[in-house]
Image (cartoon, rainbow, N blue to C red):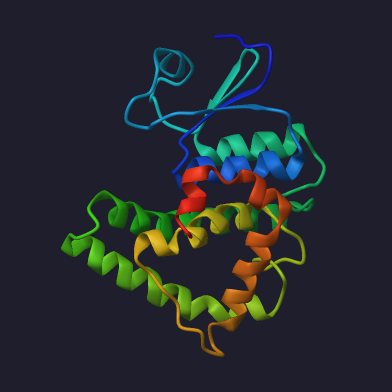
């Protein structure tokens, strides 16, 4: 498959597609975004990505899938603004945070969305909420996740936090939670985040 311009095949409600859209908006990349239902991918996507998963990025002869790979490619291809630290130790730590977020939190979200009323979903909802409350205080130290600058880690967290109402999770407005609520507000107010939202994602908070 070869296209003359960069194309992102993106699920308009999927957090993994959303994180890539945030990176593209943050970088100001000109890209064709094709909204696609994850359950009915096209032959064109399957030709580019044997797993038929979204997001899938096609950049001329190159086809990439798996959101973390796509995000890092975009960060290296379009270096400004940088979304990973320059130094190897800090870069490794950022990658590790993304890995932990996926292992600890994305898996819970996947359980909730798969069958919202199941016992597994109820347990996952409770665990995710309690986990967020536990880590809320770390956002008091720096404006972004363990960083003075907006990074790929924030690109992964923002779609998850935006989806809390859809997941049936509400956070108490207490002093303990305020740093997390303030962090969410900073994320959601970023022009790149607003630009990244699909109509269906906007509806999640209306």
Please name the residue shown 73% across and 45% down the image.
Answer: 26
Give the side of residue 44 with respect to residue 157, left or right: left
The residue most toward the left is: 119
Q: Position of residue 79 (x, y in %)?
A: 80, 39
Please name the residue shown 45% across and 19% down the image.
Answer: 45
What count of labels does the image hold?
Answer: 0
The residue most toward the right is: 80
Q: Position of residue 86 (x, y in %)?
A: 79, 50
Give the side of residue 97 with respect to residue 78, left or right: left
Q: Position of residue 203 (x, y in %)?
A: 47, 52
Q: Nearer the viewer, residue 187 or 194?
A: 194
The N terminus lies in quadrant: top right
Q: Nearer the viewer, residue 59 or 99?
A: 59
The residue most toward the front is: 206
In the displayed structure, would residue 7 be above or below residue 187?
above
In the displayed structure, would residue 62 be above or below residue 151?
above
Please name the residue shown 44% across and 44% down the image.
Answer: 13
Give the side of residue 187 with respect to residue 161, left or right: right
The residue most toward the bottom is: 175
Please name the residue shown 29% across and 57% down the image.
Answer: 112
Q: Position of residue 143 (x, y in %)?
A: 72, 71
């Amino acid at each position: 498959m070869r296209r003359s311009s960069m194309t992102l095949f993106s699920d308009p409600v999927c957090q993994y597609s959303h994180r890539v859209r945030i990176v593209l908006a943050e970088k100001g990349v000109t890209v064709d975004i094709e909204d696609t239902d994850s359950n009915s991918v096209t032959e064109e996507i399957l030709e580019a990505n044997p797993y038929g998963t979204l997001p899938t990025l096609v950049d001329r002869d190159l086809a990439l899938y798996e959101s973390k790979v796509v995000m890092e490619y975009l960060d290296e291809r379009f270096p400004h603004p940088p979304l990973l630290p320059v130094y190897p130790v800090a870069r490794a730590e950022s990658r590790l945070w993304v890995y932990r977020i996926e292992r600890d939190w994305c898996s819970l979200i996947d359980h909730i969305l798969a069958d919202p009323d199941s016992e597994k979903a109820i347990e996952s909802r409770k665990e995710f909420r309690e986990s967020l409350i536990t880590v809320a205080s770390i956002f008091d130290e720096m404006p972004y996740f363990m960083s003075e600058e907006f990074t790929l880690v924030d690109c992964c967290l923002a779609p998850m936090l935006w989806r809390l109402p859809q997941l049936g999770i509400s956070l108490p407005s207490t002093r303990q939670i305020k740093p997390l609520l303030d962090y969410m507000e900073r994320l959601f107010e970023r022009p790149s985040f607003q630009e990244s939202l699909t109509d269906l994602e906007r509806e999640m908070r209306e």
